Amino acid sequence: MAWVHLVTLCALIEYFVFAWLVGRARAKYGIKAPATSGNDVFERYFRVQQNTLELLILFVPALWMAAAYFDPRIMAAIGAVYVVGRILYFRGYVIEPKSRHNGFLLSIVPVALLLLIGVAGVARALLGL
């Protein structure tokens, strides 16, 4: 489970860095709290942070549930794809929002896969298989 712990820490640190970058962008582009709009580039940073939060709430429990029923090293590897995908999503979205597609796919597919694996693990356990 150490690999699952490591991937979870990476995802949480990644989110923390994204939040810090939003704060930095807020200062750079003069967007005073509580405003979340007013500069296109700031809004891109903000959307990446919010979109990451929306997936993170699915990713972490899905990773842990899947790892409870199947090889944690494989689940951690799937989770690592999510972390890399979020970095690519961040870079793509901030530079040019239309180029966020690959990062999005590398984020959403692992989450969906971990959810399905978690469902399979729970179903298998409940059915005594």
Image (cartoon, helix red, strand yellow):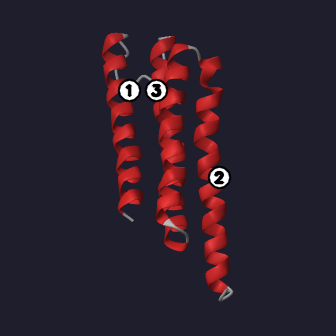
Q: Which mark is residue 95?
A: none
Mark 2: amino acid: Ala
Residue hosting label 1: 34
Q: Report helix, strand or loop for mark 2.
A: helix
Q: Secondary structure at mark 1?
A: loop
Quadrant occupied by the C terminus? bottom right
Q: Is residue 38 visible?
A: no
Residue kind at label 1, given as amino acid type: Pro
Mark positioned earlier in the residue sequence (2 or 3) = 3
Residue plotted at (53% across, 43% down): 81
The residue under label 3 is: 46
Q: Report the residue marked by disc 2.
A: 112
Quadrant of residue 14 in the image? top left
- Mark 2 and mark 1: Cα distance apart in space: 33 Å
The correct choice, above or below, for 62 with respect to 40 in the image is: below
Q: N-terminal of the two: label 2 or label 1?
A: 1
Residue 85, image quadrant = top right
